[in-house]
Amino acid sequence: MMGCWILHEGLTIILVLSWLGVNLYLFIDTFRWYEEEESFHYTRAILGSTLAWARASALCLNFNCMLILLPVSRNLISFIRGTSICCRGPWRRQLDKNLKFHKLIAYGIAVNATIHIVAHLFNLERYHLSQTEEAGGLVAALSKLGNAPNETYLNPIRTFHTNTTTELLKTIAGITGLVISLALILIMTSSTEFIRQVSYELFWYTHHVFIIFFISLAIHGAGRIVRGQTPESLSLHNVTFCRDHYAEWQTATQCPVPQFSGKEPSAWKWVLSPVVLYACERIIRFWRFQQEVVITKVVSHPSGVLELHMKKRSFKMAPGQYILVQCPAISSLEWHPFTLTSAPQEDFFSVHIREAGDWTRALLKAFGAEGQAPKEPWSLPRLAVDGPFGAALTDVFHYPVSVCIAAGIGVTPFAALLKSIWYQCCDSQTQLKLSKVYFYWICRDARAFEWFADLLLSLETRMSEQGKTHFLSYHIFLTGWDENQAIHIALHWDENNDVITGLKQKTFYGRPHWNNEFKRIAYNHPSSSVGVFSCGPKALSKTLQRMCHLYSSADPRGVHFYYNEESF
């Protein structure tokens, strides 16, 4: 159990702790620098420690903005997955958690942005209060600098009667800061799971506010509101001595009036490289958009699922990969992910699409999947395809035993896998490391079995003909039924084939008892590495992860379950 945890989940923890460690180091190092740096001594006299809080969080914000685009650069991830010899085994599986890391970085941006905003609100108020008549001493002297010729200001709020909000919104830093904050709020709130499920289109469009976010971030520091003493002034003006003789700055030669300038903006240096990389990602997508996609077959299944067969020049795939699909007739901007359901051995690639929002509803209607008359191929709307991109299921053949678990429409990634197994089992020249596959499908609606039952029936027949009935064990669970279905099932229970699917293997009713299932698999394969692959809701994923940890042996020679989750 501990071996499995340390090797796989442990790597995730190491990566997360490394990210947290870098953030913590950057924050503490920058905080200490601004607390001790001599050129900001007079700035600290007015602002106190909130200067360091604002600058430290700004650096961490830049660091996380540098990282945020990398996990969503799909072509980069596919390149690393396919070519890097060091990115194998457990390290390779970390690539499948790219969206989780993307979300983690987003939380880091939100936390540091909040600290930065709050710190600058305090700074603004302290700048304002230092212009009151009650303010005296060094703070008052510093705030009045800039009123006379040949002086540079330190305090951007020039009088106490100045409206700080209005004054702030006259500056580059104020305007871009407001834009960055609003963009971040919009992106974060529209990224919740509820919004993504209710309206994926809203999530997709608002996420592209990131373009405004990055442009504003790059020029945010150009206003140079945070000011420090210039190097030339420091060489002439000894802060340690002159801070106590501020009344003599205008007359004493050993204490000339200190000169200040804004800090050079640096955010653009942090984000330039990843932005250029992501721009290349979008250029590649645009290039693929121009490539012709030929739709060879359209199947409208009774269960409300649209099956599309397509061809594209130089298209190569692996089981479990997915593509991004765009339909310009519906939207010229939106790309939606769909898992490939065809096998690499077939001369086409296919996807199965179920209605799950405005875009898919419009697509099903455009392809005549809503009871309309079938359309001729020449009259169908044009599709653009980007990909394919790698996912966890590409590793399914690397284990001697694999367990594939799907819930509802989450079965689509396993269609390509089962087809590929079918073809490879029929090829006598192919030597497979994979010797046993357990397939579980949990579904609420019996109609959902219709399109997938034909594939399972073909597999069942072919495996029987090849004498390899032991190779694939499949278990189908129906979790929802009405009274009429229950009566129909009871009347036909004794028939050889299942009344729901038409398969020899009977359908189970209710949910799997995972403890029993994992216990049985561990018993049947006492010294094997077992890959567990799932596509379904989070609750199922958490349960399976727990089962993998629970039934993995503490003995290195025993059975070990390795969990992989399919995600986009």
Image (spheres, rainbow, N blue to C red):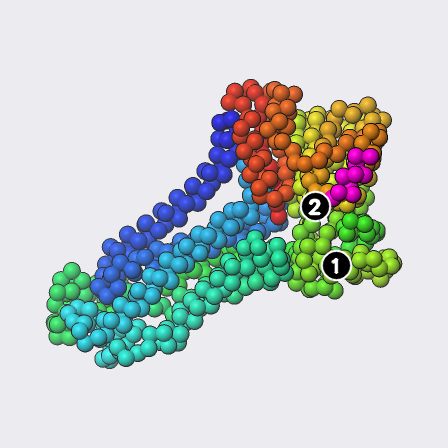
For the residues labelled 1 and 2, the Cα–Cα distance comes to: 17 Å
Q: Crowding at label 1, few (<14), some or many (≥20) Cα neighbours within 10 Å?
A: many
Of residues 44 and 252, which is closer to you in this image?
44
Q: Is residue 164 above or below residue 274?
A: below
Q: Is residue 486 above or below residue 254?
A: above
Q: Which residues are magenta?
A: 482-491
Q: On the image, which quarter does residue 447 sit in?
A: top right
Q: Which residue corresponds to the image point at 73% horizontal and 52% vertical from the top-left?
A: 354
Is 183 left or right of 502, judged from the image as shown?
Answer: left
Residue 408 is situated, as x and y percent measured from the top left of the image, at: 69, 44
- The residue labelled by disc 1 is 363
Of residues 452 and 33, which is closer to you in this image?
452
Is 324 left or right of 56, judged from the image as shown?
Answer: right
Residue 170 is situated, as x and y percent measured from the top left of the image, at: 39, 76
Can residue 554 be seen at all in this image of the molecule?
Answer: yes
Residue 326 is situated, as x and y percent measured from the top left of the image, at: 70, 58
Q: Which residue corresponds to the image point at 70% horizontal and 42% vertical from the top-left?
A: 480
Q: Which residue corresponds to the image point at 70% horizontal and 26% vertical from the top-left?
A: 436
Residue 201 is situated, as x and y percent measured from the top left of the image, at: 63, 60
* SS for callout 2: helix
What is the total number of numbered labels drawn onto the structure image?
2
Can residue 501 be seen at all in this image of the molecule?
Answer: no
Q: Amino acid at mark 1?
A: Leu
Identify the disc placed on residue 409.
2
Of residues 272 and 487, which is closer to you in this image?
487
Q: Is residue 173 magenta?
A: no
Which of the two labelled residues, at mark 1 and mark 2, occupies the earlier sequence position? Answer: 1
Identify the disc placed on residue 344.
none
Is 4 left or right of 414, judged from the image as shown?
Answer: left
Q: Amino acid at mark 2?
A: Ile
* Label 1 vs label 2, nearer the camera: 2
